[in-house]
Amino acid sequence: MIRRIVAGKGLPRIHAIVDIINIVSVESRLPIGLYDLAHVRGDITFRAGRAGETYKGIGKYDLNLEGLPLFADELGPHGSATSDSERTMVTPATRKVLAILVSFGGTENLQLYFERLQSLLAEFASGTNCQHILV
């Protein structure tokens, strides 16, 4: 997102929830994974990509995930700090989402960014029942 802004392209307007995530990502300078929970199966794990693992990134090509930190469920990888997958992407039909703020530098300000995210979701996307877990 920051590369887009620096290049003068601005933020894309996609969907209210996606737009909110992009705003908070730029403000926090943290990648935020956003997933439609209707397309997530089982528990989500955070791990390194394995040899041969790929997925189609949103609006992109098949991404080589080997060695990348990623999120996976029982169906396989669906998100990374660089691009999420089409399988779990948010669409106008989405009703429940999971947003994961990824910080490799510690937990400082994560509560502040969660509160900003929660506030914007409530104001602009009818967001209710927002919960957070710090791991």
Image (cartoon, rainbow, N blue to C red):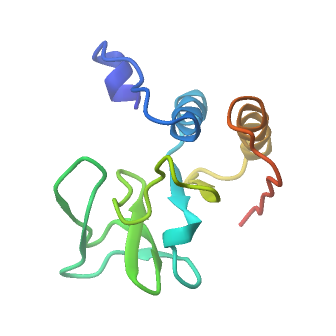
Instruction: Tell me which corner region of the image, top left, top right, bottom left or bottom right, holds residue 84.
Output: bottom left
Q: 126 above or below 42? A: above
Q: 4 above or below 87? A: above
Residue placed most toward the observer, 76 or 25: 76
Residue 100 in the image, given as x and y percentages of width and height: 60, 56
Residue 13 in the image, given as x and y percentages of width and height: 43, 27
Residue placed most toward the observer, 8 or 57: 57
Residue placed most toward the observer, 46 or 87: 87
Screen quadrant of the C terminus: bottom right
Instruction: Tell me which corner region of the image, top left, top right, bottom left or bottom right, holds residue 94.
Output: bottom right
Residue depicted at x 52% and y 29%: 26
Screen quadrant of the N terminus: top left
Residue 54 in the image, given as x and y percentages of width and height: 23, 71
Left or right: 93 in relation to 51 = right
Residue depicted at x 42% and y 63%: 79
Left or right: 66 in relation to 123 = left
